Amino acid sequence: MSVLVSTNPAQNYVPLGEVTVSTLAKVTEATSRAHMAKKGWSSLSVKERIELLKPIVDAIFAAREDFVQLIMSETGKTLSLSRDEVDRGAVDWLMENAETILAPQKTCDKPGETHEIWYEPFGVTAVITPWNFPLGEALKSLISTLLAGNTVIFKISEECPLVGQKLGEVFTKHDFPIGVFNQVYGDGSVGEALTNQDVDLIVFTGSSAVGEKIYKKAADKFIKAHLEMGGSNPGIVFADADVKSAAQIMIDARFQHCGQICDSMKRLIVEAPIKDDLEAAMKEILESMTLGDPTKEETDFGPLVAERQVRLAEAQLQDALDKGARIVAQLEVDKSLKGAFFPPTILADITPDMRVWHEEVFAPILPIVSFQAETEAIALANDTIYGLGSRVITADMDRAKRVARQINAGNVEINQGSRWLPCNPFGGYKASGMGRTYGEAGLRELCQIKMVSAA
Ligand code: NAD
């Protein structure tokens, strides 16, 4: 019996606890239970499913402080961001709107005929989630999938098994129908074993590299894969922007959660006349921020999630420096800090062959490039395999919307940082995604669409 040990990346990887890794037999057993429960769960109304999920959701948020501590200690997320993550707003939105969104929908009025769309579940669903929002990403996928009438086998990232375990305990302790929620633990090999099972749908959030493997697996099985993947969001700042406020928006957009957010702004594209001023303003802000113990209220940067992420970020940074990048600003990591700490860095003199430009950088590194013409800015923004989000800052709203139309991404935020809301669909173009989460589209994605006409 092998175990998965969870460690604290802010405290020299001290062990926090462990879970048992699911064997193939356990994964198969979980899938069989999900199959047995499928008919019962799908035949309930959305309202009945909501009633059964309500006490679970209430219990999760009643244990808010436990989740905050687990998120912070397993992933190194700062106290304030860990608190922000354990917020029930998004889940409540799903619970409050699912009945309307998934109700039969009339498509046209013809005398003596009815034409309706019915939203029906796919069935048994493998739900696989990442570590950067251990609770948030898990709840998003689980609650949406269950509300849509699917049964689930859930696997959380190997970096945060204790958050997963706590979540699983809530389902087990409540009177939730047997087999509707099932859980397995382990790394990618367990994820792979899960996607090899007889499942009807895969709901995956994680990197594009793993998403691609899952998409191929789903193609072989001829089932749907709903994929929310990586990003390398561009942020364009035009010369008519207020430099100080643009600098703050872009610092927040890049460096929150040490840059470990799919939707972070990962490439800054600034109009040449204000490049130096923007660099200087961003340097000033970065140098006023604190890196250290994530459990302290005042800390802006804790550690990255794991040693392997530090090694990757170091290689991406070194590659840029070797190819001629210039450090605009960099925080120091105090020698007393032991763990996955990495120095937040702003870089200029970037060329397209650098890894920081063409790879997703899941760490606090910001490359800056400049442009002369609007068309050049758009070309730079789209110079990526990804297409999750983007930001545009300009005083000219006509230009902002013209640029927004030409950016190949699922989200464009104009003159602001992240204004993520659960009523809006979230997801990406290109290698960033297949399908959307949240909003009307997000719930309907998890359903089969049946057209029923009658005379
Ligand atoms: P990851 O792809 O390494 O792992 C995600 C999950 O997939 C984990 O549970 C992992 O164990 C599992 N897995 C790994 N290999 C697998 C395989 N072959 N088959 C099945 N499952 C497998 O991603 P990560 O490092 O956990 O998370 C960071 C990535 O997630 C970043 O790329 C980030 O942009 C992305 N992300 C995207 C969104 C979004 O909504 N678009 C949200 C959060 C994170």
Image (spheres, rainbow, N blue to C red):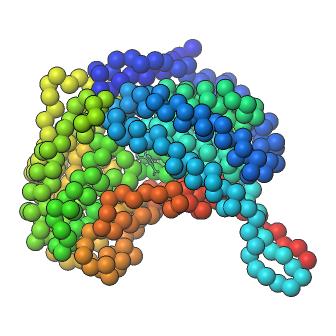
Residue 443 picture location, percent across and down: 62, 56
Please report the residue visible at 39 percent of the width from the left and 76 percent of the height from the top. 405
Residue 61's x, y, as percent? Answer: 54, 36
Relative horizontal placement of residue 244, taking residue 3 as reference (left or right):
left
Query: Does residue 328 sit above or below 69 in this rendering?
Result: below
Q: Is residue 67 visible?
A: yes
Relative to residue 32, is residue 54 drawn left or right? left
Is residue 402 found left or right of 147 in the rendered image? left
Horizontally, is 10 left or right of 429 in the view? left
What residue is shown at x 82% (from left), y 48% (from top)?
Answer: 43
Q: Residue at x 15, y 50 (%)?
A: 285
For the C terminus, give its image quadrant.
bottom right
Q: Viewer-proximal residue, 122 or 290?
A: 290
Residue 343 picture location, percent across and down: 18, 38
Residue reaching furthest to the top: 1
Which image quadrant is residue 300 in? Answer: top left
> Image quadrant of residue 21?
top right
Q: Quadrant of the N terminus?
A: top right
Q: Is residue 190 positioned above or below 400 on the image?
A: above
Q: Nearer the viewer, residue 210 or 232?
A: 232
Q: Is residue 322 visible?
A: no
Q: Give the mark count.
A: 0
Tell me residue 105's x, y (percent). 74, 69
